[in-house]
Amino acid sequence: MVSTYPATIVPISYDQRYIDGTNIRSSDRQLDISSVGLAIKPTVGDQALTADGTAYHIIAGDPNNFYGAIDVVFIVQGRSIA
């Protein structure tokens, strides 16, 4: 079953020094996902996040929160779905 959730996503290109072609590819993007009003927690394996017209799936993630309790932003590595 596919579910759709509106979210504010900011795609950011990785700095060249982090791109190794395996763990981080040149087409990967850091996706900063705002937790404000978000009904779910983005997790590794989630698919079809759309930012700037490109669909991504999450291959790595790092929830940023205060004191381990309040999610502020989800920083994930997105790989385009080809």
Image: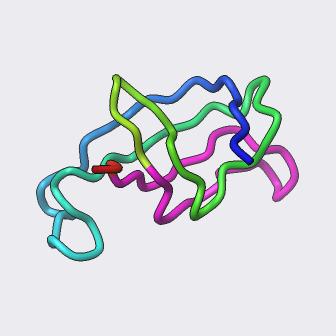
Picture layout, residue 12 above or below residue 69: above
The residue depicted at 35 percent of the width and 50 percent of the height is 81
Residue 24 image-quadrant placement: bottom left
Picture layout, residue 23 above or below residue 82: below
Residue 6 image-quadrant placement: top right
From the viewer's perspective, is 59 left or right of 66?
left
The residue depicted at 47 percent of the width and 53 percent of the height is 57
Residue 33 in the image: x percent, y percent?
57, 36
- Name the outermost residue toward the right: 69
> Which is more toward the observer, 70 or 50?
50
Residue 60, magenta (yes or no): yes
Residue 15 in the image: x percent, y percent?
19, 51
From the viewer's perspective, is 40 left or right of 22?
right
The residue depicted at 41 percent of the width and 51 percent of the height is 78
Magenta range is 57-79
Residue 72 in the image: x percent, y percent?
71, 38
Picture layout, residue 21 above or below residue 28: below
Residue 51 in the image: x percent, y percent?
41, 29
> For the image shown, how many numbered marks are present on the structure?
0
Picture layout, residue 19 above or below residue 47: below
Residue 73 image-quadrant placement: top right
From the viewer's perspective, is 13 left or right of 49?
left
- Name the outermost residue toward the front: 1
Magenta region's main secondary structure?
strand
Residue 30, magenta (yes or no): no
